[in-house]
Amino acid sequence: MNVLYVEKPSFTVIGKLGCGKAKEVADWLPPLWQAANGSFSEISEWAKRDEAGNLVGLWGAMSDVEESFAVWNEQGKYLAGCEVEDDAEAPENWTKWVIPGSRYAVALCTLDTYLDVFTRTKADLAEAGLPIVGAVHEFYDPKDTSGDVYLYFPVARLNKRQER
C-alpha cells in the first residue's frame, strides 16, 4: 500500500461537531457535513487559504469522546469543518479544535475504498511496528473534485520544538 509520511504542526479546525457510535457513522456523519456546508459563510472569513486564495483544506477531524484525540472505541467524536487561522473564534453552534502536531502516515482512498484502505493501512502500520497514537483524521482537498479522501494516521506526536 502506498503511504506517504508527513509532519504537520498543530492546526485549527472549526466545524460542526457530532458524537455517536462507530458502527453507526453512516447515520450521523452526513448531517454534520450538510450542516457545515450549508452554513460555511459563517466561518469563511477565518478559513485558511493558500497564495491563490483557495481553501487550504476541509477536515473530518476525529477524537475520542473525552476530546483527547485518542483512537475511537465504541463511540467517537467527529468535527466536519475547515482548517482556519489559529486565532479564529468559533461562532455560536460551531466548535473549534486545535489538532495536536503529529507525524502522519497518509493513505489515499475514496468513499468506496475507505474501509478497505483504513483496515489495510492499520494492519500495515502494526506490522511495521508503528503505533497509531491518536484518532485518524480525514482530509479533503477543496481543489480536488475526484472524491479522494486522505486518511491521516498519527504515528507520533510532535513536541513544541519539532513544530517550529
Image (spheres, rainbow, N blue to C red):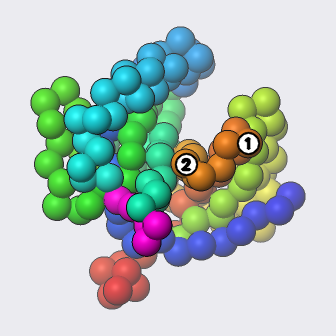
Residue receiving disc 1: 146
Helix, strand or loop under label 2: loop
The label number, if any, that marks residue 47 in the structure image:
none
Q: Is residue 67 above or below residue 131?
A: above
Q: Is residue 158 above or below residue 125?
A: below
* Residue depicted at x 25% and y 41%: 43
Which contiguous range is marked in magenta? 48-52
State the image coordinates of residue 118 (x, y, percent, origin top left): 72, 43
Q: How many marks?
A: 2
**Residue 127 is a magenta residue:** no
* Residue depicted at x 23% and y 35%: 42
Label 2 crowd bin: few (<14), some (14–19), many (20+), radius 10 Å: few
| Left-right relation of 18 to 128 | left
Residue receiving disc 2: 142
Q: Quadrant of the C terminus?
A: bottom left
Viewer-proximal residue among 19 and 66 = 19
**Amino acid type, residue under disc 1 in the picture:** Ser
State the image coordinates of residue 57 (x, y, percent, origin top left): 48, 53
**Residue 49 is a magenta residue:** yes
Viewer-proximal residue among 130 and 83 = 83
**Amino acid type, residue under disc 2 in the picture:** Pro
* Residue depicted at x 26% and y 61%: 85
State the image coordinates of residue 40 (x, y, percent, origin top left): 33, 34
| Left-right relation of 149 to 104 | right
Q: Quadrant of residue 115?
A: top right
* Residue depicted at x 44% and y 54%: 55
Q: Is residue 52 visible?
A: yes
Q: Quadrant of the N terminus?
A: bottom right
Real-space Cα distance between discs 1 and 2?
10 Å
Residue found farthest to the top: 27
